[in-house]
Amino acid sequence: MNKISMKSLPIKIKAGLVSFAIVGVAANCQQLNAATCSCAGVSLSDNINIADFEAEKFRLYVGYSYHDISRLVEKSRTIVDDTGRERTTETLGLTLNYGINKNWAITANINYVEHFRNISLNNSAGESSSGIGDTLIVLSYAPQKITPFEFNQFAFGVGLKIDTGKNDEGMPIPFAEDLQPGQGSNGYSFWAHYARSFSQKADWLFFIDGNFQSNEENSRGYSYEQELSIASGVSYSSDANWSARLALTWRKADAHTRASSTLPNTGGEWIDFSPSFSYALNEKHSLGGSVRIPLSRDLEGELQFTTKQLFSVYYAYQW
Amino acid sequence: MKQIQAFFSVVVLIIIQACGGGSSDSSSPPPQTSNEWLIPVAEVVDGGPGKDGIPAIDSPVFESPIDTNLVNDELVIGVKIGQQTYAFPHSILNWHEISNFQASGTHLTVSYCPLTGTSDLWIPPANATNKTFGVSGLLYNSNLILYDRETDSNWSQMLNQAVNGQLMGTLAEKEKVVETQWQTWLAAYPDTQVLSRQTGFNRNYDAYPYGSYRTDSNLLFSVANTDDRLHLKTRVLGIQTSQLNKVFVIEDFPTGVNVIQEEANGFEYVVVGSSDLDLAIAFRSRLSDGTLLAFTPVQDNLPIVMQDNEGNQWNIFGEAVAGPRSGEQLDLASHFTAFWFAWVAFYPTPEIHAF
């Protein structure tokens, strides 16, 4: 495939590619993480960017993420885990986005999730669960997008989390909720997005994204309750078809409940650094990846396992 | 374009295959369980941490009282093996639930379930090569299910029985434990050894891992039976036999040592309790030779707590330490100190002793 040079393209295509790169990177929706438990500080909202669409265009993201949730934390302090715990979640995800028109879009996300848990104190092979996770459908409205003549961008979204996930792995004794592919409950969410460019070229952007989620109880009376996350940072789109995004994300999650009783050692606040990168092969295909680097956390209770490392990669196709 | 279509087709096929693979056979049953249980398996739950996610203490270190920093009203589990006594603080067992240790050449396992407030002392099966237990990560009526490391069988603490696995149906061989405040235990046994915080694990033993659970009105897991006659977390001494299901609320005992001697449907027992000493234990009052003793309390002479009509003096472990029967032991009446909700979960509609 011949490498595309931005300088040689007609301006319409340049503008289109710039727009694609802007929203594609500002989205960070390439982090196709588990659309299931929001344990360990991983927000379910990472999968979706509500401003990332073009009128009457489909965009399909296929991604993989690996999440190691084996860091043991006492409130804010990391402590040595002497149980030799392995705890990972791998996710294969699909996100399909369609621009109904220039202002409205609909997005659907579903994942295949595999959890694994093992304690090296015993000599067992560990426990694993796998299956389809819950489905997220988001309707977004972007009244204003960045163009060479408009430097501000706004978007809002409302979403439904639909209980499509498998929630009874481990039968006859189902695993605990954090080891299930799905939460077993429905929920709803709200998004808000703002971005600003600093030139007509719009190579640099500043952005703020907010997301609020609320979850119902599942059939075992368990609920992930509510969480709020705000991400802010900058992105850069180069003339050489690559883009980069740096974000700081703050997230606060309520303690989980069972039969309306608060469960100890759940919930808390996290601050993470999330760099991501994407490369447009051409105007239809792109690749990208991201990592999440925990910076600090203040967790409820006395002891929790949380993110040690998280990375994801994706392929996107637009038509 | 054809390449893209082919790629997309492959992606779709992968997803379809993944969806088909995400079925009930995509994960194997937990390796430690067979499918046969003596208890309703639908009422067994995964507590969350996983097998050994709460690590048992396998190499306990003991220290003298002078080296500890226990506070007076902190609860400990007291154990007496021969002439040596040991105290296992709740503050440590809240985080580990099990301590395997040896005393006088005997392998022993102390267990404490912080969710049900129950403690126990077992002697592992004699023919086992590995005579230790671990925390299975499973719960029944919120109560700890242990697993033995010899056969991987699962044991219900409050049922004192293996309820799953190769040893299913085997009864635990119990030894006596006394749960009381540290100051009471120290007064009774000043030469006691105390489980040290040098457990080999990194835990903040000054902290309680379950928030307000000890005193609030919430349960973390559902139970089979409920009863609102008492607050959920009221600590009770519960006695359960085929003839009797009765609880004594520990904080309702008068101050000082109290002795309550009763008979129910032919079952004769004596309860020793004290609210200020935070102590309650129960024994059978008829000896193996058929003698039915009559007991009265002994004050301010721990560990001696009662005297009988023959002139024998008995300590909190039911051992005759003075008198013509010196060296003899009273049999335990089957009992637990537990949170009220846990007792009724296992043994519903008990009689509540009226003081």
Image (cartoon, coloured by chain):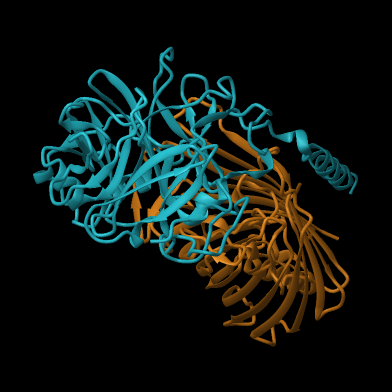
Chain colours: A orange, B cyan
Query: Which residue occupies the foreground of this view, B79 or A9?
Result: B79
Considering the image in quadrants, where does the C terminus of chain A appear?
Answer: bottom right
Q: Residue A33's quadrant in the figure?
A: bottom right
Tell me: B354 left or right of B2.
Answer: left
Tell me: B15 left or right of B225.
Answer: right
In the rendered image, residue B277, in percent from the top left (x then y), is placed at 23, 55
User: Does A7 sit above or below residue A184?
Assistant: below
Tell me: A245 left or right of A314.
Answer: left
Query: Which residue occupies the foreground of this view, B61 or B273?
Result: B273
Total number of numbered discs in the rendering: 0
Furthest toward the left, the residue is: B66
Please say whether residue A297 is visible from this viewpoint: no
Please say whether residue A191 is visible from this viewpoint: yes
In the rendered image, residue B124, in percent from the top left (x then y), is placed at 41, 22
Q: Residue at x 69, y 34 (%)?
A: B27
In the rendered image, residue B155, in percent from the top left (x then y), is placed at 52, 31
Q: Residue B85's quadrant in the figure?
A: top left
Tell me: A56 left or right of B346.
Answer: right
User: Does A113 sit above or below residue A244?
Assistant: above
Query: Which residue occupies the foreground of this view, A62 or B155?
Result: B155
User: Does B86 sit above or below residue A146?
Assistant: above
In the rendered image, residue A132, in percent from the top left (x then y), is placed at 75, 48
Query: Which residue occupies the foreground of this view, A199 or A214?
Result: A214
